[in-house]
Image: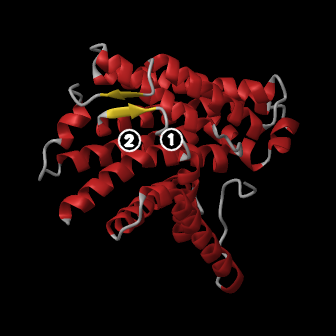
Amino acid sequence: MIGAVDATLQIAFLYAIQAIAVAVAFRVIGFPDLTPDGSFILGASVSGVLLLAGFPSWTAMFISVGVGALAGTLTALLHTRLRVSMLLSGILMTLILYSVSLRVMGTSNLSLMNINNFLSTLVTQSGSLLPLCVTAIACLAVYLLVLALLSTQAGLRLRATGDSSTALELRGLPRETNYIWGLAAVNGLAGLAGSLIAQYQGFVDVSMGGGLVIIALAAMVMGETLIRPERVSSLIIAPVVGMVIYQGIIAVALRLGLTPADLKVTTAILALIFIAMDRLRSQYGSITRQIGNRSI
């Protein structure tokens, strides 16, 4: 039982990096970006190919962040230069990245079971708390990095873009630049998450990124229902808490006999339950101020 809880927390902390990225896009920037689905698998595929070629784990992760950031930049350019809608920009880029990932791998899946990397080495240490500590530290490092970034002058402008892009432009600060570097950072984190998950699981599959934005949004809603973020720090920690809860519920459901084919409908039901809880508390309970773009 302890081993199952430990494994659930490990995978939750790694997927929480993706959830943080999605939360920044939707809540901070106010951009409903679906590109992280594609950036995740692109980061995983690039990382897998590099590891098979003999590159060290850190190099693979660094390059995965770079290709994810490039994907986010292209999504922003589709919207700002070609005037494609926010939602369609992400959809188009996700489709492109799916094909690019297949080209990068040359196949639909890669096995990394015989490749030594720091995460796979940790996972084999059964009975040790080291894997859990490392995954928790990785998630904490991303959380602190995002929090520090949003506390800078550029980060404040990014937050203003999500709060009121019109007011930002009236002050002579174009939102296009914020969209570009903001989505680059978001998808860089998604690429990092893909690289870490690939190393942790020991394989890359082109379908592993499908629907992750929806899962991250469900986790974000769960976390915000419980935390009711009033500060940036709680806004960013909410998806982490929600992802831990989500992975825990899924793990219990699978043990009770739920089939993997039912996971998507379970995700939707969980999100709806927590949304309903949030609405009921807002209607009948004390109303607290929540920050972030709430229109998405």
Residue 279 falls left or right of residue 244: right
Q: Residue furthest right?
A: 170
**Closer to the camera, 34 or 293?**
34
Indicate the amino acid at tag 2.
Ala
The N terminus: image quadrant: bottom left
Q: CA distance from mark 1 to mark 2?
A: 9 Å
The dot on residue 113 is: none
Q: What crowding class fits label 2: few (fewer than 14 Cα within 10 Å), some (14-19), or many (20 or more)?
A: few
Q: Does dot 1 land on a helix, a strand or a loop? A: helix
The C terminus: image quadrant: bottom right
Q: Position of residue 127 (x, y in %)?
A: 11, 53
Residue 178 falls left or right of residue 1: right
Residue 279 seen in this snapshot: yes
Q: Does dot 2 land on a helix, a strand or a loop? A: helix
Residue on which the image places disc 1: 146
Question: Within the image, what quadrant is residue 98 found in?
Answer: top right
Residue 169 falls left or right of residue 216: right
Q: Position of residue 279 (x, y in %)?
A: 68, 75
Q: Earlier in the sequence, mark 1 or mark 2?
A: 2
* Residue depicted at x 65% and y 64%: 290
Q: Is residue 228 above or below residue 247?
A: below
* Residue depicted at x 51% and y 17%: 103
* Residue depicted at x 27% and y 54%: 7
Callouts 1 and 2 close, C-beta under 8 Å? no
Residue on which the image places disc 2: 141
Residue 224 seen in this snapshot: no
